[in-house]
Image (cartoon, rainbow, N blue to C red):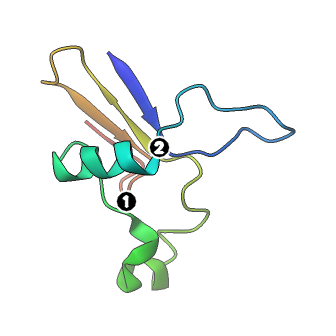
Amino acid sequence: GKVYSLTPDFGEGEENPNLISKKKYQELVDAHIMFKDMAADPYLASAGIASDWPYGRGCYVSEDSQFIIWFGEEDQLRI
């Protein structure tokens, strides 16, 4: 499988090897694999759910794309 991460970096100049481009992110959203930008939703933003967007957000997709785990979404972990 593969991890798709939205976290820009890990701090202190350490790059994220799983960081995806904005284009790839949109492809995953359009395919209903990745969740939408929570910071763009005024209700989620007002509830504080979008705090620190996009740090700690992403997903794991199995090799056959039949199994997806979202992390950092509203539920923190969704399988």
Three-letter amino acid code of the residue under disc 1: Glu
SS for callout 2: loop
Closer to the camera, 49 or 4?
4
Picture residue at 47% right of the left edge, 79% below the top: 45
Residue 7 in which image quadrant? top right
The residue drawn where x is 44% and y is 51% is 22
Is 65 drawn above or below residue 9 in the view shown? above
Disc 2 designates what residue?
Answer: 21
Q: Say which residue appears at 55% left-offset and 61% top-offset.
A: 53
- Identity of the amino acid at label 2? Ser
Report, in whole angstroms, how far the alpha carbon at label 1 lies from the one at label 2: 22 Å
- Image quadrant occupied by the N terminus: top left
Query: In front: 13, or 49?
Result: 13
Residue 39's spot in the image, x, y percent?
46, 72
Q: Which residue is mark 1?
A: 74
Of the residues under marks 1 and 2, which one precedes in the sequence? 2
